[in-house]
């Protein structure tokens, strides 16, 4: 076990509160400080969760040598800038999902982390849970035969939340919920995806509201994944095989796994071990990796972060979902290219 570590939380929303409460009950970990764009919100959060320091800015937090790890709990649109600030100041980072708004941002962040020799990982919490090992063990036991297909559903009625419908905040169901079903498929069936088909319904603001994604794997397996911000789903993952099927309750925070035989009769149910909230696993894994001098977590390696981000980029391209800041970057790149071409042509003429 590592020595006492101090965590700084960047952001003061609901998920930041869950993390603060989790850290309170963890061993050898202390929530030392919190930062918000509002000094008042930071102080209120610190008072509520018994945190020692309320920073007046993000910059003040990353300059504090007492912070061993920064947990980023801001909207998706802010992750890139927030991580960049942390890494440039030598701070290790545990960033909420989705890691960034797109793969280009993720690649830049991970390159910077490598350059600065800083630890960075994505807080895709289910990847760090011990229950995942149990689930994989049951699948690999052959009890349902070789799996051929899976389905996964994760939906909530959350379309009233601004961050979900606002394009400027990288809103939409995909980065909030779809990222979980994509990760579930990856954890169960791997990364050898041959084709990705999908359908989508957009909000009036132009972000994805409901989506169905079908992944076809090179070995013939198939994954059908569904998410929406317009209603609740059973949150189940089901893995099908020739001898039966496996039902996983709550792919967003594994609760149990039950095996059914070919006659649809349920066998033994295995329940997940008791936990604080489930957030503790990603924190412990991050701090243990930092203690060992590692720059990524084996549970969520950097190449897998990039692969999932690229999948989401491809899906958004299929749906025509583009965030405003991506359009601005594209315009800038076009203008820069035109300037460069003009300079080159003039030089050629002068020659």
Image: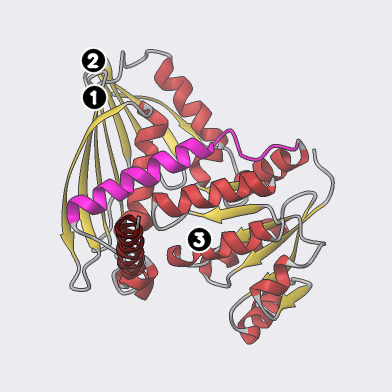
Q: Position of residue 76 (x, y in %)?
A: 44, 63
Q: Is residue 272 left or right of residue 267?
A: right
Give the mark nearer the N terminus: 1 vs 2.
2
Q: Position of residue 258 (x, y in %)?
A: 38, 29
Q: Position of residue 4 (x, y in %)?
A: 83, 50
Judged by its main secondary structure, the magenta piece is helix
Q: Is residue 168 left or right of residue 27?
A: left
| Front position among marks 3 and 1 | 3
Give the mark nearer the N terminus: 3 vs 1.
3
User: In this orientation, which residue lies closer to the viewer: 326 or 125?
Assistant: 326
Q: Is residue 300 above or below residue 99?
A: above
Quadrant holding the C terminus? bottom left
Q: Would you name the residue on which mark 1 appears?
A: 264
Tag 2 near tag 3, CB within 8 Å: no
Quarter location, residue 58: bottom right
Q: Secondary structure at mark 2?
A: loop
Give the mark nearer the N terminus: 2 vs 3.
3
The boundaries of the magenta stretch are 293-319
Q: Is residue 33 left or right of residue 93?
A: right
| Front position among marks 2 and 3 | 3
Which residue, as the protein is rendered here, is positioned at the far bottom? 40
Q: Secondary structure at mark 1?
A: loop
Instruction: Tell me, for residue 242, which label it has, or none.
Output: 2
Q: Is residue 171 above or below residue 186?
A: below
Residue 49 visible in the displayed image: no
Residue 179 visible in the displayed image: yes
Q: Would you name the residue on which mark 3 appears?
A: 80
Quadrant holding the N terminus? top right
Spatial CA distance of label 2 from label 3 is 44 Å
């Amino acid at each position: 076990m590592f020595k006492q570590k101090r965590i700084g939380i960047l952001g003061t929303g609901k998920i930041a509160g869950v993390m603060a409460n989790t850290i309170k009950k963890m061993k050898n970990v202390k929530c030392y400080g919190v930062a918000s764009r509002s000094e008042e919100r930071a102080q209120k959060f610190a008072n509520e969760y018994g945190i020692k320091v309320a920073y007046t800015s993000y910059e003040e937090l990353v300059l504090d040598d007492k912070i061993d790890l920064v947990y980023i709990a801001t909207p998706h649109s802010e992750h890139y800038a927030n991580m960049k600030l942390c890494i440039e100041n030598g701070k290790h980072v545990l960033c909420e999902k989705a890691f960034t708004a797109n793969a280009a941002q993720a690649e830049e962040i991970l390159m910077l982390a490598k350059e600065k020799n800083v630890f960075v990982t994505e807080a895709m919490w289910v990847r760090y849970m011990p229950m995942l090992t149990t689930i994989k063990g049951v699948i690999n036991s052959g009890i349902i035969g070789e799996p051929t297909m899976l389905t996964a559903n994760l939906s909530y009625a959350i379309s009233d939340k601004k961050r979900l419908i606002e394009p400027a905040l990288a809103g939409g169901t995909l980065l909030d919920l779809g990222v979980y079903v994509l990760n579930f498929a990856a954890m169960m069936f791997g990364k050898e995806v041959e084709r990705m088909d999908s359908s989508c319904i957009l909000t009036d603001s132009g972000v994805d509201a409901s989506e169905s994604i079908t992944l076809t794997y090179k070995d013939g397996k198939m994954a059908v994944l569904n998410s929406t911000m317009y209603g609740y789903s059973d949150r189940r993952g089901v893995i099908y095989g020739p001898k039966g099927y496996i039902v996983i309750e709550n792919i967003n925070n594994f609760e149990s796994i039950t095996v059914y035989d070919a006659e649809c009769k349920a066998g033994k149910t295995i329940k997940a071990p008791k936990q604080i909230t489930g957030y503790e696993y990603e924190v412990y894994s991050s701090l243990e990796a930092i203690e060992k001098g590692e720059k990524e977590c084996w549970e969520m390696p950097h190449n897998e972060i990039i692969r999932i981000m690229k999948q989401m980029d491809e899906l958004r391209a299929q749906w025509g979902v583009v965030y405003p800041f991506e359009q601005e970057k594209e315009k800038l790149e076009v203008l820069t290219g035109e300037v460069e071409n003009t300079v080159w042509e003039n030089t050629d003429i002068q020659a």
